[in-house]
Image (spheres, rainbow, N blue to C red):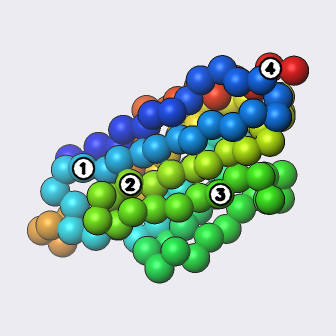
Amino acid sequence: QVQLVESGGGLVQAGGSLRLSCAASGGIRSINVMAWYRQVPGKQRELVASITRDSNTSYVDSVKGRFTISRDNAKKTVYLQMNSLKPDDTAVYYCNADGYMLWGRTFDSWGQGTQVTVSS
């Protein structure tokens, strides 16, 4: 069973930075897309950034120029560097990954979420 473990959330003042990490484990042969989503109470989960195995990236407009997604395929880890944080970035951030297990089955898994709070 695939597990995604996130770390790096916390409380930061507006204008500050945080770096989120998400490590995947559990019988994985390969990972296709890794992504970060966020959700605030009462709203739908929003795709923040994604990265393919070949490191092609995509961002929601509201974070372009401030957030950078990257990955280390050898470590099965994805990162989200968040700079110039704003109070509107406050949310629970979730990691997502899809790919193939060692025995050929596909997976699409989520992390448990990490809270990011930006104070004004």
Measured in 3D between alpha carbons, the distance from the residue under mark 2 to the one under mark 3, in whole angstroms, is: 14 Å
Residue type at mark 1? Ser
- Marks 1, 2: nearer the viewer: 2
Is there a contact, CB below 8 Å, between mark 3 and mark 1? Answer: no
Front-lying residue, 6 or 19: 19
Measured in 3D between alpha carbons, the distance from the residue under mark 2 to the one under mark 4, in whole angstroms, is: 28 Å
Query: What numbered label is drawn on residue 25?
Result: 1
First reached walking from the N terminus: tag 2 or tag 3: 3
Measured in 3D between alpha carbons, the distance from the residue under mark 4 to the one under mark 3, in whole angstroms, is: 21 Å
First reached walking from the N terminus: tag 4 or tag 3: 3
Rendered-image quadrant of the C terminus: top right
Measured in 3D between alpha carbons, the distance from the residue under mark 4 to the one under mark 1, in whole angstroms, is: 33 Å
- Marks 3, 1: nearer the viewer: 3
Residue type at mark 4? Ser
Measured in 3D between alpha carbons, the distance from the residue under mark 3 to the one under mark 1, in whole angstroms, is: 23 Å
Q: Residue furthest front?
A: 16
Q: Residue at x 59, y 58 (%)?
A: 69
Measured in 3D between alpha carbons, the distance from the residue under mark 1 to the one under mark 2, in whole angstroms, is: 9 Å
Q: Residue at x 12, y 68 (%)?
A: 103
Residue type at mark 2? Thr
First reached walking from the N terminus: tag 1 or tag 2: 1
Q: Which residue is mark 4?
A: 119
Q: Which residue is mark 3?
A: 68
Q: Would you call the spot at circle 2 few (<14 residues within 10 Å), some (14-19), or many (20 or more)?
A: many
**Of helix, strand and loop, which one carries label 4?**
strand
